[in-house]
Image (cartoon, rainbow, N blue to C red):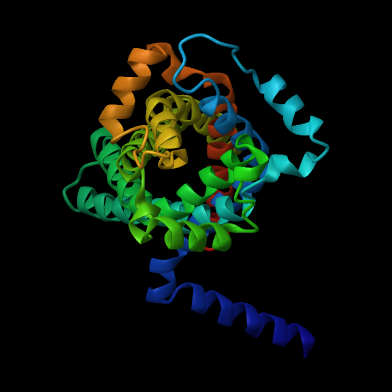
Amino acid sequence: MMGTAKSDSAVVANDFLHTPFMRAALPFINGGISGMVATTVVQPVDMIKVRIQLAGEGKAGGPKPTPLSVTREILASGKALDLYTGLSAGLLRQAVYTTARLGFFDTFMSALSSRAKANGNQVGFTERATAGLAAGGLAAMIGNPADLALIRMQSDGLKPVAERKNYKSVIDALTSIARSEGVGALWAGAAPTVVRAMALNFGQLAFFSEAKAQLKKHTDWSANTQTLSASAIAGFFASFFSLPFDFVKTRLQKQQRGPDGKLPYNGMADCFAKVARQEGLFRFYRGFGTYYVRIAPHAMVTLIVADYLAWLTK
């Protein structure tokens, strides 16, 4: 009787997974879960990356922070858990952003695959790139408030003690920003955030999909090895294309009005121009190694978990 009950439960669960609603929702659910798992793994690296990007703002010279020096400085405060500052915002961001971008990408690719199959063709790199760009841009706009809260929480420790907000959680950060700066402030830095997401998704999703297709075609590697290799390749291209926009996004989302009521930067173009003039063009790629160590494992964990969840729920 117990065996029959288990069998019946499995059938019911399988039928539920194959309802039209769940087939449409699963790419979004799987994407969100995989992104949250990946963020939990790489959050300390993200914290270090943000601190490196904010160091030496407005100066061409000065000390150049390294991942080791930033980590040592954080740990010297006696709070190792500070490396996980903003984790709640990071998880909320993934719950919104990665849920949307992987869900949209999978939905777009399914539609493109169906159309290509009907025409007797295969989905090409151009279609994959377009799907990645569109999915990234849409998701970034939706997830910008959580992204902003993450940057504010991670940069709060750089301020003098008397000026720190000491946000208790992502909800506290969001409500505090909305109350003091207006709801519109939650979309500060949205332009570079959207462009960064499009560049990152172009590098990550399009190159992952293409690399996996090419590895499957030209190698006899196992499916797991192909997925791991494709995600590592995708991580490099995602880092290369998106870092300058990630840098500008961090600067814009961290900024607050000074005593004169003015912001340091008037927008994405102004930030690019001022940083290039005052700090040099190479500043945009400062911390590329740390960024890659943050992006590549995040991409690998996200895509591998998403692939596994897709297999479990197929």
* Residue 105 seen in the current view: no
The residue at the far right in this view is 78
**Vertical comparison of 243 with 173: above or below:** above
Q: Outermost residue, front direction?
A: 260
Residue 192 at x, y = what percent?
Answer: 33, 37
Residue furthest toward the left?
A: 119
- The quadrant the N terminus occupies is bottom right
Judging depth in this view, the residue of 280 and 22 nearest the camera is 280
Q: Residue at x 50, y 18 (%)?
A: 286
Q: Is 304 rendered above or below residue 221?
A: below
Going by the image, does 148 lie left or right of 78?
A: left
Number of dots carrying numbers: 0
Q: For the point 37% across and 31% down, which residue is it?
A: 245
Q: Position of residue 34 (x, y in %)?
A: 56, 52
Residue at the spot x=42%, y=23% of the render? 240
Which of these two is toward me, 7 or 92? 92
The answer to whether any part of residue 74 appears in the image is: yes
- Single out the residue that lies furthest toward the top: 61
**What residue is at 37 percent from the left and 61 percent from the top?**
183
The picture places residue 112, in percent across and down from the top left corner, at 25, 50
Q: Nearer the viewer, residue 237 or 264?
A: 264
Residue 202 in which image quadrant = top left
Residue 44 percent coordinates (x, y): 67, 37
Residue in front for this viewpoint, 97 or 231? 97
